[in-house]
Each structure stands twice: as structure tokens, then as C-alpha cells.
Amino acid sequence: MGNANAGSDIVLVAHGYDYEEKVINALINAARNGPISMERINESVYRILKLKQKYNLNDATINSIDVNNDIQGTVEEMRKQGL
């Protein structure tokens, strides 16, 4: 919870679903029991929403994209250019 109290607005977890679930539950408990204040949570929410507005990001569903094809095309172009 140190990250959240130190100013992190988003916590990234990359150790599998079980670990993610533990982190989420720990954050919820910290918010309910006091180590993380509602003021701190509101500050993060405000900053995140402000950035989403600035960059015109929303929660709308986007059409599926094929990242693998896009990357492969870029790799092929780089090869052609000798990079």
C-alpha cells in the first residue's frame, strides 16, 4: 500500500491472477480501514479522469485490431530498409 500512499495513481500487477486478487483485496481493505484515505483515492481518481479527458480517452469499446499483423508489417518494412 506504500505505492498508493506515496502518490501512485495506478498499481500494475504482473504476477498472475491470484496475486492480482490479493493486491486488489489489500487495496480495498486499506481503503476501508484507514491506511489509504478517501482523500488520497479521490486525488488519484481526479488525476486519472483529468488525463482521460485531456487525451480524449473513454471506456467505449473499440473494434478489434490485429496487433500481430501490424507488428509484422513494421518488421518487414524495417528489414527492407536494412534496419
Image (cartoon, rainbow, N blue to C red):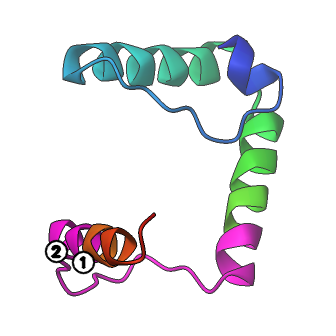
Q: Is residue 36 visible?
A: no
The residue lying at 67 percent from left, 81 percent from top is: 55
Q: What residue did someone put label 1 on? A: 73
Q: CA distance from mark 2 to mark 1?
A: 6 Å
Q: What residue did someone put label 2 on? A: 69
Give left or right: position of 45 versus 60: right
* The residue stretch that appears in magenta: 50-73
User: Please, what is the three-letter code of the amino acid marked with disc 2?
Assistant: Asn
Image location (x, y in percent) of residue 35: 73, 12
Give left or right: position of 27 versus 74: right
Give left or right: position of 62 versus 55: left
- Give residue 77's quadrant in the image: bottom left
The residue lying at 65 percent from left, 14 percent from top is: 1
User: Please, what is the three-letter code of the amino acid marked with disc 1?
Assistant: Gly
6 up-or-down from 70: above or below: above
Q: Nearer the viewer, residue 29 or 83?
A: 83
In the rendered image, residue 13 lying in the magenta stretch gets the answer: no
- Give residue 71's quadrant in the image: bottom left
Question: Is the residue under label 1 in contact with that under label 2 (CB below 8 Å)?
Answer: yes
- Give residue 7's quadrant in the image: top right
Image location (x, y in percent) of residue 78: 38, 71
Q: Is residue 66 visible?
A: yes
Q: Secondary structure at mark 2?
A: helix
60 up-or-down from 2: above or below: below
Image location (x, y in percent) of residue 50: 76, 71
Residue 36: image tag: none
